[in-house]
Amino acid sequence: MEKIDYTEKVRNKINGDNLKYIVLTMGCKLNENDSEKISGMIELMGYSKTEEFENADLIVFNTCCVRENAEERLFGKLGEIKKMKEKKNVIIAIGGCMMQEKSMLDKIKQSYKYVDIVFGTHTLQDFPKDMYTAIVKNEKVKNVIDIDGEIIEGLPIKRSDKYRASVTIMYGCNNFCSYCIVPFVRGRERSRNPEDILNEIKGLALEGYKEITLLGQNVNSYGNDNFKYCELDVKSEINTFAKLLRAVNEIDGIEKIKFISPHPKDFKDDVIEAIRDCDKVSKLIHLPLQAGNSKVLKEMNRKYTKEEYLELVKKMREKIPNVYFSTDIIVGFPGETDEEFKDTLDVVEQVKYEQIFMFIYSIREGTVAAKRADQIPDNIKHERFDKLKALYESQVDKLNEKYIGTIQKIMIEGPSKNNQDMYTGRTDSNKVIVFKLTGNENIGDFVNIKISENHKWFLEGEIV
């Protein structure tokens, strides 16, 4: 059967009408990467990007379902653009993780009948066909499947940055943490063909990209599925995350390699040694803690204890010179007592994270934790959040002092948002640095900065 090119059909239909689109991303780095692919497909259909909703002929919401505020944000935006739909025939599409939840689909169908296209995480590649159905056939589209999606290679992509790019190495998650909806909406773990990953990164290097972030819900379980979701011509030697890191490190033109997010239970010695040995791989390790108490961790289904987590941190510090840590912490998990929460504070005291991403627990329907009767009252959640925030902020100044007088290799990202005379970049540990150019540097260049001042939330220095 002849394959229909719906991208061309949509492009022919709009016929150079100078239509505009906007994509609003409401989730994690994986969502951002998906949005770049959505944008790539849309631009091939003949649309050009706008930053203003009022100018858009196509509005796409790429949703997240990890936290409740993402839902509130989506429904707020949908309310705002209802009048736009009434004034002109703007196409409204909603995709992403939230659309994999039946309750959300039902709510869209019942309360937001003016939405034209709904698509899920496993049907991203069908977006041109969905657009054709909505525009040419003037039909509503619901394109969501519950089974694990295929790995689709070769989708067009419109990247948001000229020098830094994200590359997905795997999809889905097998961990089923009791608070998390992701395995239900993203499916099981599916590793991409290593050659496809390396070819994508080599292509990015040729385009001038300098920094690569490898993406996955659990990157250090890469290859554990034996690549059963993708085709391998021969059994690849690059069959683990550690081997993939080493292979990416050899690609000419790439100067910095980052990755998110790993899982502590899968952090094997070969990955630690690869981080140590690979000069381009960032020494900032994002090591999600979620909670510091072993009982709470067990109820979260995290598969490690407080002691095992701290032992892993110790091992990394022994094996990797100048290693840094960032983390995720959930405050107010069901049943967590004040004493158990103190264990979280104790881990923060011991590890001294460069960054902490703090979240107040919110119920996700469909998860084990959502069914528990011992939910923590909101006022207690907020009290604990404030204590965690205060502890971290009390550590920041002292942590920053170690940078004074050091030389940091950073990429020039662009002008400072607060001072147009200054430029910004980030240390390997993701600390923001502001500095002046000498006149010979360009955005995207790597330069050495000598740190001279600590301003708590950013550092200041000069090019040397």
Image (spheres, rainbow, N blue to C red):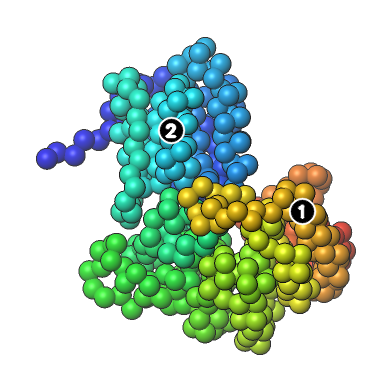
Q: Is residue 349 left or right of residue 217?
A: right
Q: Residue visible at 33% across and 65% down?
A: 193
Marks 2, 1: nearer the viewer: 1
Q: Residue lying farthest left? A: 1
Q: Residue visible at 34% across and 37% down?
A: 143
Q: Residue lying farthest bottom? A: 318
Query: Residue 195 appears at what percent x and percent y?
Result: 34, 66
Q: Is residue 401 left or right of residue 180?
A: right
Q: Secondary structure at mark 1?
A: helix
Q: Up-down: is 88 above or below 38?
A: above
Q: Up-down: is 285 above or below 332?
A: below
Q: Secondary structure at mark 2?
A: helix
Query: Foreground residue, 106 or 61?
Result: 106
Q: Which residue is mark 2?
A: 106
Q: Is residue 24 left or right of residue 424?
A: left
Q: Residue visible at 37% across and 75% down?
A: 238
Looking at the picture, which amino acid does disc 1 mark? Answer: Ile
